[in-house]
Image (cartoon, rainbow, N blue to C red):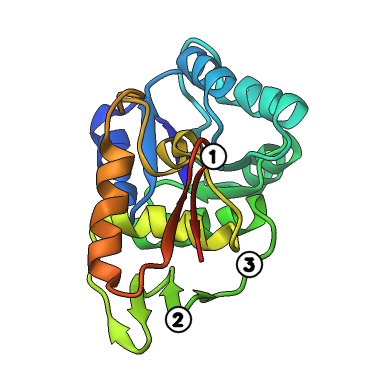
């Protein structure tokens, strides 16, 4: 998934981002609400992890803007206030879920994954096509019963291709979903990742190139 973390405590923000990247998500980080609104206007996010008390533009306003303009983006609101009224108010603003600080990263990760499933069309728990099975929760890939070890980027790209269910996915879309905003749009990262995927998945080839369109699973 493509995720935006909005948190004014840099150490916490960077730790959350690092943990989510380790789970093969593309993660951007900003430290105030104004920067969050700028990123949201430019990038297509699946989930926004939003601290309620960020500066410049308050998290409440960011949440309202998301609810009005980007109804397909799911919001996990974070706050140090743990009272029932605070949680109710946060949800009333348009947040999809609410997590009080301090929190365990495992719980945040699970909530982000649940919101990501809601942000996309329904998909089976294990993605399957052309003899490939990808379990996004165990982070395991098999082809014809053989375990296939993949890097985080390879796993993310393969997941996007499998979700497309045989239709072509452009290199731009793969770059958007599997890399963060620091990725160079003119890089060969997608092509190189596809080459590595083909090698690891083995013969017969199942990742096909549609010239001028993108890549798809046979």
Question: Which comes sooner in the sequence, label 3 or label 2?
Answer: 3
Residue in the picture at 35% in, 74% down: 204
Residue in the picture at 32% in, 23% down: 186
Q: Relative to residue 131, is residue 194 drawn left or right? A: left
Residue pointed to by mark 2: 131
Residue pointed to by mark 3: 123
Question: Which comes sooner in the sequence, label 2 or label 1?
Answer: 2
Q: Position of residue 212 (x, y in %)?
A: 51, 35
Q: Specify the quadrant of the image occupied by residue 124.
A: bottom right
Residue in the picture at 52% in, 74% down: 129
Cα separation, mark 3 vs mark 1, equals 23 Å
Mark 2 and mark 1 in contact? Answer it, CB < 8 Å: no
Label 2 crowd (10 A; few <14 / some 14-19 / many >=20)? few
Cα separation, mark 2 vs mark 1, equals 24 Å
Badge 3 marks a residue whose secondary structure is loop
Label 3 crowd (10 A; few <14 / some 14-19 / many >=20)? few
Cα separation, mark 3 vs mark 2, equals 17 Å
Badge 2 marks a residue whose secondary structure is loop
Mark 3 and mark 1 in contact? Answer it, CB < 8 Å: no
Question: Which comes sooner in the sequence, label 3 or label 1?
Answer: 3
State the mark number for residue 213: 1
Q: Position of residue 85 (x, y in %)?
A: 68, 43
- Decide if residue 104 is in sight here: no
State the mark number for residue 12: none
Q: Position of residue 207 (x, y in %)?
A: 41, 60
Q: Relative to residue 18, is residue 113 drawn left or right? A: right
Farthest residue, direction bottom: 145
In the rendered view, tell whether residue 59 sits above or below residue 214: above
Which mark lies nearer to you, 2 or 1?
1
């Amino acid at each position: 998934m493509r995720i935006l973390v909005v948190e004014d405590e840099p150490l916490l923000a960077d730790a959350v981002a690092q943990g989510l990247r380790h789970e093969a998500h593309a993660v951007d980080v900003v430290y105030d609400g104004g920067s969050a609104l700028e990123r949201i206007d430019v990038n297509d996010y699946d989930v926004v992890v939003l601290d309620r008390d960020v500066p410049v533009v308050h998290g409440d306003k960011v949440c309202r803007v998301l609810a009005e303009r980007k109804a397909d983006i799911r919001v996990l609101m974070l706050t140090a206030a743990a009272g029932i009224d605070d949680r109710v108010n946060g949800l009333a603003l348009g947040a999809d879920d609410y997590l009080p600080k301090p929190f365990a990263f495992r719980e945040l990760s699970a909530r982000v994954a649940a919101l990501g499933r809601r942000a996309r069309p329904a998909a089976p728990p294990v993605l399957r096509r052309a003899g490939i099975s990808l379990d996004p929760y165990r982070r395991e890939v098999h082809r014809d019963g053989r375990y296939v070890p993949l890097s985080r980027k390879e796993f993310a790209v393969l997941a996007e291709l499998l979700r497309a269910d045989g239709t072509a996915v452009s290199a731009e879309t793969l770059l958007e979903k599997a890399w963060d905003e620091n990725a160079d749009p003119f890089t060969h990262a997608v092509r190189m990742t596809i080459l590595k995927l083909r090698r690891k998945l083995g013969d017969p080839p199942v990742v096909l190139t549609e010239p001028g369109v993108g890549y798809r699973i046979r």
